[in-house]
Image (cartoon, helix red, strand yellow):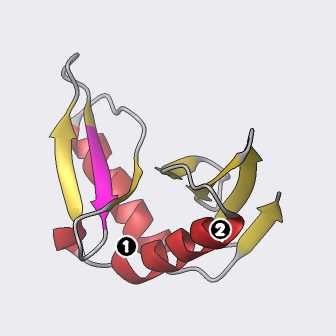
Amino acid sequence: MSGYYDLKRSGDQYLFNLKAANHEVILTSERYTTKASAQEGIRSVQQNSPIDARYQRKTASDNSPYFTLTASNGQTLGRSEMYSSTSARDNGIASVKTNGPTPTVKDNT
């Protein structure tokens, strides 16, 4: 099994998680006001996730490495969890590159 998108509601908003085959969350989206906008966000991740230049490798205030994935217009599509090392973060990016293009969406709205 490959990765998949888990589309869900959060209050009156929508968001999605990209999950690896082991069901671990590897990318969490921004919040969207409509389901259609969240679905468009998924399409954008599918298109942008294979492109290395779309990843911003960052460090949190507690020195935990993480990354964000951006669209071609610079808008943030999603962010990762906090990692224990830069190599773990880079493995996370590799997983999003591998799983991001998947067409599988589990609609849990």
Q: Is residue 79 left or right of residue 41?
A: left
Question: Front-most of 108 and 97?
Answer: 108
Question: Measuring 28% from the left and 47% from the top, which residue is drawn there?
Answer: 67
Question: Measuring 29% from the left and 64% from the top, which residue is drawn there?
Answer: 70
Q: Which residue is mark 2?
A: 4
Q: Is residue 47 magenta?
A: no
Q: Tell me, yes or no, if residue 30 can be seen here.
A: yes
Question: Measuring 73% from the left and 44% from the top, which residue is drawn there?
Answer: 12
Task: Give the residue furthest to the right.
Answer: 108
- 53 lies above or below 77: below
Q: Tell me, yes or no, if residue 3 can be seen here.
A: no
Question: What mark, if any, has residue 28 been given in the picture?
Answer: none
Earlier sequence position, callout 2 versus callout 1: 2
Measured as percent of width and height from the top left, residue 107 is found at 80, 65
Task: Mark 1: give few (<14), some (14-19) or many (20+) Cα within 10 Å.
Answer: many
Question: Measuring 66% from the left and 62% from the top, which residue is drawn there?
Answer: 34
* Quarter of image, res 7: bottom right
At numbered mark 2, what does the secondary structure look like: helix, strand or loop? strand
Measured as percent of width and height from the top left, residue 58 is found at 18, 41
Image quadrant holding the N terminus, namely: bottom right
Question: What mark, if any, has residue 49 been given in the picture?
Answer: 1
- 100 lies above or below 65: below
Secondary structure, magenta segment, majority class: strand
Residue type beneath disc 2: Tyr
* Quarter of image, res 73: bottom left
Residue type beneath disc 1: Ser
The residue stretch that appears in magenta: 66-70
Question: Front-most of 24 and 59?
Answer: 59
Q: Is residue 79 left or right of residue 62?
A: right
At numbered mark 1, what does the secondary structure look like: helix, strand or loop? loop
